Image (cartoon, rainbow, N blue to C red):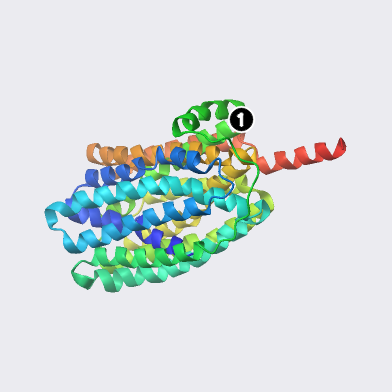
Amino acid sequence: MFGQTGMRLVSAPTFMPAYLFALSGSEFVVGLTRALQAAGTVISPVIGASTVGHRQRVLSATLITAAMMRIQILGLALSGFFLGQRALLPAIVVFLTFMGFFQGMAQVTMNTLRARVIPVHRRGIVSGTRNFLAGFTSAGVSYLAGAYVLENNLLGNGYGSVFLIAFGIATLGLGALAFTRETETKTVRPRESTRETLRAIPALLRDNPDFARFFIARALGSSGRMALPFYILYAGTQMELTGTVLGLLTTVWMITSSTSNLFWGLLADRRGYRVVMIATLTIWTLSHVQLLFVESLSGVIAFFIVMGIPSGGFNQSGQNMVLEFGDTEDIPIRLAASGSVVNFVGAIGPLLGGLIVWAFSYPALFIVTIALQLVGLLILVRWVPEPRRRHMDTGRTRNRFT
C-alpha cells in the first residue's frame, strides 16, 4: 500500500508531465522524457526473468529492484533542490530512465513473488484492497501536495518536495515488504542467461497461442499510454493549471481508481480477469471519446473520473492473466515477454504522441489512441479465452481419468 502510494505520486498523469512542461515548454520534450522512462522497461523484464526464473526464493531480488526504483525517486527530489535550471531537465531524464529500467525488473520479481505467496482465487481481492487503500492515501497526499506544497513552493522547489514525500512513503512500503514470508517452490526453470531467456520467448508464444493472442491484445490496449502524459497538457489548453487544480485532478483520479479497483478485484476472483480486462479497456476507450468534447474544468474532472475507473483494473487484470496462461515455472518468462512488449508500447507511445500533437493536434492523438484500443478490444473479445476456465476443464479431465 505504501509502495503504491509513493509510486502513484510520480506516475500520476498530472505532476510529472506538468513539471516537465514547466521546465521545457514543449509537448515533445514531455513525450520524449516519458518515452525514455518507458524505454528503460523494455529489456529489463527479460533481465528480471533470467535473474529469478531459476530461484526457489525471490524475495531478496524483489527487495533489491524495489529499492533501486526508490533511489531514482530520491534523485528526482534532490535534483530539484540542488541543480540549476540548465542541469535540472537532463537529470530528471536520467533518473526517470533508470527508474523505468528497475521498474521493468520489479514487474517480474514482484509479480513472481505474488504468484508464489497469494493463491490464484485470492489475488483479485488482495490486489483490489491494496489499490483501494493506496488510492485513498494517495488522494489525500496528492491534494496536500498540490494545494499546499506546490502552491507555496515548499523548500524552494514544490515539485522536488512532492517527490521527496513520495520517496519517504514508498520506502515505508519497502520496509513492510521485507517481512513477507516466502516458501520455496520446486517448479522452476533451469538457469538461463538474459540472451537465452530472450530467445525462449518466440517458442513460448508459438507453443501457447492463447497467450500469444492475449499478448497482442494487451499491447494494443496499452496504446492508451501514448496519450497518458498529454491529458493534463490538453487540460491546460482549456484552463489555468494551478497547484490546487493539479492536486484536485490527481485526487479525483486516485479516489476513482482506488474505489473501482476493489470492485474489479472482487469481480476477477469470481469471474476471472478476462471479463475485467474487457470491461476496463472498453471504459478506457470511451473516456478518450469523452475527452474530445471537454471544454471546461467540470469536463476535465468528469474525464479523470471516467478514465480513473478502469486505470488500475486494466493493469491488474493484464498482469494477473499472465500468471494464469500456462505452467508455473514459466511465469517469469511470460511476465518478461508481456511486460517487455507493453513497455515497448509505453516507450514509443509518448514519443509518437508528442509528434502527433506537434504535427497535428491533441484531438488527432486521442483519435489514433481510440482506433488502436478498439482493435485490441476486438481481439480480446473474439480470440482470447478465459485461462482460468481452461485450468478448471483440465482439472475435471484429470479427475475423470484418475
Relative to 87, 166 lies left or right: right
Residue placed most toward the observer, 356 or 91 = 91
Picture quarter containing residue 214? top right
Q: Position of residue 114 (x, y in %)?
A: 57, 53
Point 39% across, 63% down: residue: 6
Point 48% across, 42% down: residue: 51
Point 54% across, 59% down: residue: 261
Res. 38 visible in picture: yes
Residue placed most toward the observer, 192 or 140 = 192
Q: Position of residue 2 (x, y in %)?
A: 45, 65
Relative to 242, 379 lies left or right: right
Q: Which residue is mark 1?
A: 208
Point 63% across, 58% down: residue: 266
Residue placed most toward the observer, 165 or 11 = 165
Q: Quadrant of the C terminus?
A: top right
Q: Position of residue 183 (x, y in %)?
A: 63, 54
